[in-house]
Image (tube, rainbow, N blue to C red):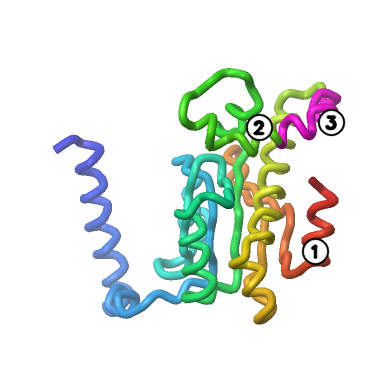
Amino acid sequence: MDQHLRRLFDNNRTFVEQVTQEDPEFFRRRAAKQEPHFLFIGCADSRVPIEMLTGVAPGEMFVHRNIANQVVSADFNLLSVLQYAVEVLDVAHVIVCGHYQCGGVKAAMGDTSFGLVDHWLAGLRDQVRDHRAELDACDDETARFNRVVELNVLRQIYNLARTPIVQGAWRRGPRPLLHGIVYDIHDGLLKELAMAVDGPEKVRALEARL
């Protein structure tokens, strides 16, 4: 077996031994059902280990990942995850997490074709065009890149808020709360961008930032 693959199994056994020594019923309790507090929508980038960097335990976070943490109205995969999280699991919080140095964002900012992913990033490319004047006025390349990462997160929170799933949930009550955050891969810290969006007033305030 490849040494890198073998390491996964070795690490798994070590993890299980450590956990069960501290709590022999840990896995038995979680096997019965899941009761996550969060739905996390993030980028597929391997440098964003959300469970590790937030310290959540298994069962606390329902997760969906894709290239550049997009919320696309035609993505039935994401919508199915969202509906299950909101209507069945009754999560209190839905988090969209972007990250600096995102390859998907970088691709959307340029003119190079990357094949199939170009279709996936079409909405993000539109957003870059919509903010072209602001971005061109920024002389610092890193700051410009970071700004697009942040705008992307705000846009995806806005897209979430407009889904029938979230709209329906808000008509029933004050949950879920929508949050937009960015992970800085340089220092490991999370940055708050838009927190506790829970209805039309905050959605309008969010739209004004786009």
Determine whether the residue tagged by mark 3 lies in a helix, strand or loop. helix
Quadrant placement of the C terminus: top right
* Residue beneath disc 2: 125
Q: Residue at x 78, y 34 (%)?
A: 130
* Residue beneath disc 3: 134
Q: Residue furthest top?
A: 112
- Graded by Cα atoms within 10 Å as few (under 14), some (14 to 19) or many (20 or more), the crowding at tag 3 reads few
Determine whether the residue tagged by mark 2 lies in a helix, strand or loop. helix
In three-dimensional space, the C-alpha distance between marks 3 and 1, rounded to whole angstroms, equals 24 Å
Q: Position of residue 199 (x, y in %)?
A: 75, 69
**Residue 16 location, quadrant:** bottom left
Position above or below: 164 against 71: below
Q: Position of residue 190 (x, y in %)?
A: 63, 51
Is tag 3's residue or tag 2's residue first in the polypeptide sequence? 2
- Per the rendered image, the range of residues in magenta is 127-138
Is tag 1's residue or tag 2's residue first in the polypeptide sequence? 2
- Graded by Cα atoms within 10 Å as few (under 14), some (14 to 19) or many (20 or more), the crowding at tag 1 reads some
Q: Residue at x 44, y 41 (%)?
A: 46
Q: Amino acid at mark 2?
A: Arg
Is residue 78 highlighted in magenta?
A: no
Q: Residue at x 50, y 45 (%)?
A: 48
- Graded by Cα atoms within 10 Å as few (under 14), some (14 to 19) or many (20 or more), the crowding at tag 2 reads some
Q: Amino acid at mark 1?
A: Lys
* Residue beneath disc 1: 202
